[in-house]
Image (tube, grey):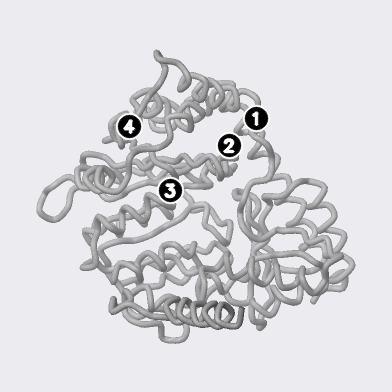
């Protein structure tokens, strides 16, 4: 019995030592440059810690931009038909074209890009989401390019650039080697007259996190700037359907010359509640060429065929339903629901005396806390209101002093959040 116990202890010790052993493989030096955790997992970590310390608290999330409303009937029927077809000999599909099946490419083109210069259905590349496409674009561009992006901006533009080796180290505020185009209130559009030339320009409109949508004049200026410098714009239009202002284009391809200098990426995530379904698309004109004259689209497809086997055929069936009249109507109604949430939040903060941006053309509300650290404000709101927001500095140094409130929440939670905000901040800051 004693011998058996001794053996088990020895065996357990050996397993522990083996588990702690390291390999001789060096860590990717670029991944090692990344700061702390990715923004939203870090928020989740802090939320969980707050919940553990306050087990009875009902936490409301206005943080991550994840949709909350169920899939709508017509779109759900499209997904259902796509799934049911997979259970028949006639309807079953295996691997499909990495660019997406022709019917959905045609449906997206006809609904959103018909007649635009340099585009046709073959310019549409269907994927599992715009965030994934941005990663594939970075693989396509490689490490030997220079990058500019809005500040503040969605973190994936920075982090994917770091991982690819396009940057230097973090200097305490930003990464060396990235050009941060500071976007200040009230319009949050960068001063391009002071911007240096870079190969790639990441630009999001409506902007995440500020909620500001670029005007036609501003996008015309951006396209002219890119063409003058021989740059490529990666234009993230993930929230374009939220735009109400007729002076703010819903696609950069409304601007003359954009086909020769821009890639557009978009998604069904926030339009149709496909955050868990996963479906998006990227638009690249045959007019867009690299310096050696080779088509950008050709390389994008080459990357896709190497690391991607195409979007789910079931998701694509749902995407076709989204682009049909009944599905399009349902998507716009869903967007209107979230926009109403945003307007409720914005009005509340304004009535409490805060300076607030966004909401009019976007699902985000950008609230100013001048002179304060964003993470401190995030923690304060969590402690005082049991509400999760997103610290502005998580989107870049220029975002410090702000927090972002997302309208992607159930209406009853938004109304409850409003009451909590009023109770905690009714007299302002």
For numbered disc 2, what is the local secondary structure? helix
Residue 282 as seen in the image, left or right of residue 379: left
Q: Are marks 2 and 4 in contact (CB under 8 Å)?
A: no
Q: Residue at x 41, y 57 (%)?
A: 203
Q: Residues within 10 Å of mark 3 (few under 14, many from 20)?
A: many
Q: Are marks 2 and 1 in contact (CB under 8 Å)?
A: yes
The residue identified by callout 4 is: 95
Whole-percent x and y of residue 53?
79, 74
In which quadrant of the rendered image does the C terminus lie? bottom right
Residue 122 coordinates in the image, percent (x, y): 28, 31
Q: Is residue 8 toward the left or the right of residue 136 in the image?
A: right
Q: CA distance from mark 3 to mark 4?
A: 21 Å
Q: Please provide percent x and percent y for residue 34.
A: 42, 75
Residue 343 to residue 244: above or below: below
Residue 72: give its label: 1
As measured in the structure, the alpha-carbon distance from the residue carrying label 3 to the one carrying label 1 is 22 Å
């Amino acid at each position: 019995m004693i011998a058996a116990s001794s053996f088990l202890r020895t065996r357990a010790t050996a397993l522990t030592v083996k588990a702690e052993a390291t390999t001789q493989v060096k860590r990717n030096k670029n991944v090692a440059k990344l700061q702390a955790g990715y923004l939203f997992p870090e928020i989740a970590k802090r939320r969980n810690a707050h919940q553990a310390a306050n087990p009875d608290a009902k936490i409301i999330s206005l943080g991550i931009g994840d949709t909350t409303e169920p899939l709508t009937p017509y779109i759900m029927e499209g997904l259902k038909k796509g799934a049911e077809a997979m259970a028949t000999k006639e309807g079953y599909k295996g691997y499909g074209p990495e660019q997406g099946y022709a019917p959905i490419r045609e449906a997206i083109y006809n609904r959103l890009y018909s007649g635009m210069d340099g585009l046709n259905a073959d310019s549409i590349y269907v994927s599992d989401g715009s965030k994934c496409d941005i990663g594939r674009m970075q693989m396509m561009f490689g490490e030997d390019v220079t990058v500019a992006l809005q500040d503040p901006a969605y973190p994936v533009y920075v982090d994917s650039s770091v991982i690819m080796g396009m940057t230097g180290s973090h200097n305490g505020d930003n990464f060396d080697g990235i050009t941060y185009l500071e976007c200040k209130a009230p319009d949050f559009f960068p001063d391009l007259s002071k911007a240096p030339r870079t190969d790639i320009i990441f630009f999001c409109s409506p902007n995440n996190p500020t909620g500001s949508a670029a005007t036609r004049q501003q996008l015309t200026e951006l396209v002219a700037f890119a063409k003058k410098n021989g740059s490529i714009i990666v234009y993230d239009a993930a929230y374009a359907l939220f735009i109400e202002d007729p002076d703010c284009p819903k696609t950069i391809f409304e601007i003359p010359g954009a086909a020769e200098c821009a890639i557009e990426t978009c998604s069904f995530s926030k339009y149709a509640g496909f955050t868990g379904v996963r479906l998006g698309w990227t638009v690249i004109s045959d007019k867009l060429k690299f310096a050696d004259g080779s088509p950008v689209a050709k390389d994008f497809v080459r990357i896709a065929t190497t690391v991607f086997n195409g979007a789910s055929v079931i998701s694509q069936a749902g995407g076709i339903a989204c682009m049909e009249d009944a599905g399009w109507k349902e998507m716009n109604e869903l967007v209107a629901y979230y926009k109403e949430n945003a307007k409720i939040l914005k009005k509340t903060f304004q009535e409490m005396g805060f300076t607030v941006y966004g909401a009019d053309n976007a699902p985000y509300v950008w609230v100013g806390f001048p002179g304060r650290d964003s993470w401190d404000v995030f923690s304060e709101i969590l402690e005082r209101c049991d509400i999760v927001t997103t610290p502005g500095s998580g989107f870049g140094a220029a975002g410090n002093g702000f927090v972002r409130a997302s309208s992607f929440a159930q209406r009853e939670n938004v109304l409850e959040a409003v009451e909590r905000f009023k109770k905690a901040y009714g007299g302002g800051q």
